[in-house]
Image (spheres, rainbow, N blue to C red):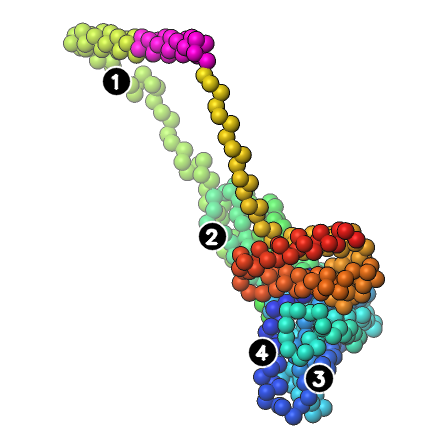
Amino acid sequence: MFTRLRFWLLPLMLALLASNARAANTGTPSGSKLFIESSLDNARPWVGQEVRLTWTLFFSGTAPQIEDKSQPEHPGIWAREITPENYIDSTPVSKNGVLFRKAVIKQLRLVPLQSGKLAVTNYRLRCLVPQSGEASLDSRNDIESILTAPPALLQARALPKPAPADFSGAVGRFALTVSPENSTVHAGEPLTLSITISGKGNLDTPPPLTVMLPEGLRREASATPSAPSAKGAASSISTRLTLVAAKEGVFRFVPVKLTAFDPETSRYETIASNRIAINVIAGQAATTSAPPQPPLSAVMPPAADTDPLDAVIRPIIVSMAVAVLALIFGLHLRYIERHKRAGVQQKTSEAANPSRPAATSAPATPAKADRKSPRSLRNELYEALKKAGVRNPAGLTSKELGVQLKEKRVKEQTIAEVTELLSAIDHALYAPGEASPEKLETMNRNAARIIAELLKL
């Protein structure tokens, strides 16, 4: 019920703008007129061509709280929603002489997968309008409206026939760019090419690329393409391709081609990447090889005569080192023996003088239980309501919850306390900032009392 605010910030944004519109047009009554419009940026696309569908909400008076009631149906059409944060906004508009505010609430990228008449239907939106005419987080008295968007109709055109043999299936206007990781490599070393397809068209399924390599270069491996990125109507996707040079030389070539259908010219177009140059030099093993080394006996200098003084000093140094090690070892053994002796004496003393049992300490005062979070309180309250016989309390409005509690013969005061507690929890969850410790303490105390009363039913 109270988790249904999918776009809970939107009403706060729209409420300020809507209040300004009412102040500027006091002659227009502040009703709750609501409706949705569906619009396509291209109603006659080619099969495989991407179009954009926009649903716009028109309202007057207080901005409603909204959530999706059902997802749209689109047989024969690939669809993906555009991130809502990119377009939520509100602007004034006049419709048939009446001042409204409009806000784009959802946008879809559509690609027809077959030719003929196709439709996007059955998108429904749930709106909650405050009965008092002022935006509030308390939704107990909100007026609920279910709006159904008009169908969005497409007349998809089949691609011209015959298609070229190397047609990739891509539909749009694209450009190809290739950039090598290095322009100079050794023979036998891998070389990575970064291939980018950009332009206006659907790139969620990357088209196959025709790779053209000169003799002496071979394709080693191709990495998985990265996720496509979009900026406005344009999108792009990158792929890394690994090559290996089998011989030395300078290779100048155009590595990649792509055949796509251009909707703007209604023709199949073959685009080619930029020309690159790769300089392959001799392998590292050949360049770093050294001439044969002379025999070791010819390189090593003859051993020098032994110094008589060194023959006297070396035994003395060895003897001193052995003495130091023996001293360290003896000190270590003495320490271990003394430690064992002290342990035996301590055990003997304890046996002779048994220690008195320690006085039993007073039980510690139980620490104050941590306050439960608003989300935990809401879940516990929902469980108590279910045990009281309420079906799916999370999906009910305040009014529907009150009706079911009355059927269970719950007191009016308890019903009011339940709805007030849920409203306070919603405010703590969705209002900017954090709830104060005093407010959390009050909610925890009220929740414990109300849950205890519900469990008695």
Residue lying at 63% horizontally and 90% vertically, measured from the top left: 26
Mark 1 in CB contact with mark 3 (< 8 angstroms): no
Q: Could you give the CA–CA distance between mark 2 and mark 4, rounded to whole angstroms? A: 58 Å
Which quarter of the picture shows residue 330?
top left
User: Would you name the residue on which mark 1 appears?
Assistant: 301
Q: Which amino acid lies under the numbered mark 4 shown in the image of this protein?
A: Leu
Considering the numbered disc 4 on the image, is that residue within a helix, a strand or a loop? Answer: helix
Mark 3 in CB contact with mark 4 (< 8 angstroms): no
Q: Which amino acid lies under the numbered mark 1 shown in the image of this protein?
A: Pro
> What secondary structure predominates along the stretch shown in magenta?
helix
User: Would you name the residue on which mark 4 appears?
Assistant: 16
Which quarter of the picture shows residue 316?
top left
Mark 2 in CB contact with mark 1 (< 8 angstroms): no
From which residue to which does the magenta span run? 329-354
Rendered image: mark on residue 322: none
User: Would you name the residue on which mark 2 appears?
Assistant: 183
Residue lying at 82% horizontally and 60% vertically, measured from the top left: 409
Q: Could you give the CA–CA distance between mark 3 and mark 4, rounded to whole angstroms? A: 16 Å
User: Would you name the residue on which mark 3 appears?
Assistant: 31
